[in-house]
Image: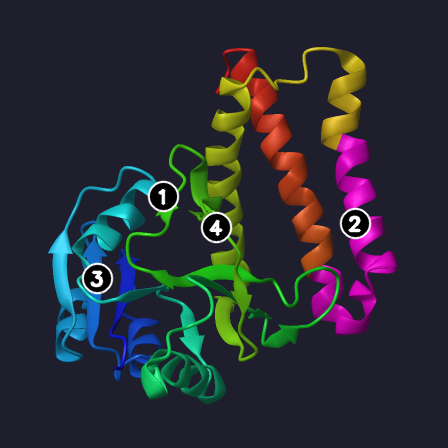
Amino acid sequence: MRQTLSVAMIAMNEEANLPRTLESVRWADEIILVDSGSKDRTLEIAQSFGAKTSYHAFGGHGEQKNVALDLCTSDWILLLDADEVLTPGLQQEIRELLDCKDNCSPQYDAYWIPRLNLYYGRWIRHGGFYPDHKLRLFRRGSARLSEGVGPHSTPQFTGPRGKLKGDMLHYAYPTMGIYLEHMNRYSSEIAQLLANKGRTSKSFPSFIWNTVANPVATFIYNYFFRLGFLDGREGLILHINHSVYIHWKFIKAWRIGQGKE
C-alpha cells in the first residue's frame, strides 16, 4: 500500500522562490505552509498550488517548523525550505520509496538528502559544501526540530537512517545583498546563543582564537584541504565570506558580553 506524503514548509515573503519550489512537490498528497506575516504574494502563490496555509508568529526556526510538522496528516513528512527544489531524480526516488510495492515498507524511518547549493550562479561542489546532507524525509511523529538553537535547527531522530541519491537544489544566495543580509541576521542569532552559553571571548587568548585564528583556519581547511578552490572565483568568495561570518558571530558575542549589543 502506498505511503502518503506531507510537505512541511515555513515562509515569510517568499514569492520569488515559491513557484519553483512548489512545482517540484506538486505531486505530494499534502502541502503545509506556515507563514509568519508575509506582505507579498506568498500566501496567494501557495494556495494556488493547493497548499494548506496558516499564520503563526515567528518564535524561532525550529519552533516554527515544529508548528508545520504538527499540522501534517500524512504517513511521511518532507521538510522543505522555500528556496529548495527537488530534482526530477529525487522526486522519482521518493515516490518509488513510498510506493511500497508487494506490501513492503521503507527500510528506514528517516532519510538523509544530499543538498547542492547555488552561490552567485555557480553550483558549489567542493570545500565541504557538498553533498551537504540534510535529514528531511521521515515518518510522521518520528522526528522533531531542535528548538532554541537559532537558524541551524535540525530534525532530531534516533535510530538508523538511510541516504537518498537525488539532489535537493538550494537556490541560496543569488546576490551579494541577500547573502550579507542572511549572514548578518544569522550571525546575530548565533551570537546571542553563544553569549547565553558564556562564550563571549572574555580572555584575550580566547578572543584572538575565536575572532581571528578560527576564521583563518576554517578558510585554509575548506579552501585548500577540502578543495574549495575547484569552485573558481565563486568558491573563493564563498569561503572568504564564510570565514567573515565566523568572525562576525564571535565579535557580536563579545560585544553582547560587554553589554554593548
Q: Residues within 10 Å of mark 3 (few under 14, many from 20)?
A: many
Name the residue tied to disc 4: 182
- Point out the tag, 1 or 2, that comes first from the N-terminus: 1
Of circles 4 and 2, the one toward us is 2
Name the residue tied to disc 2: 219
- Point out the tag, 4 or 3, that comes first from the N-terminus: 3
Q: Is residue 201 above or below residue 249?
A: above
Give the residues in magenta: 212-237
Magenta includes 24?
Answer: no
Please provide percent x and percent y for residue 104: 37, 79
Which circle marks residue 62 in the picture?
1
- Is residue 210 left or right of 221 when viewed as pictured? left
The CA span between labels 4 and 2 is 19 Å
Of circles 1 and 4, the one toward us is 1
Name the residue tied to disc 3: 33
Q: Are marks 4 and 2 in contact (CB under 8 Å)?
A: no
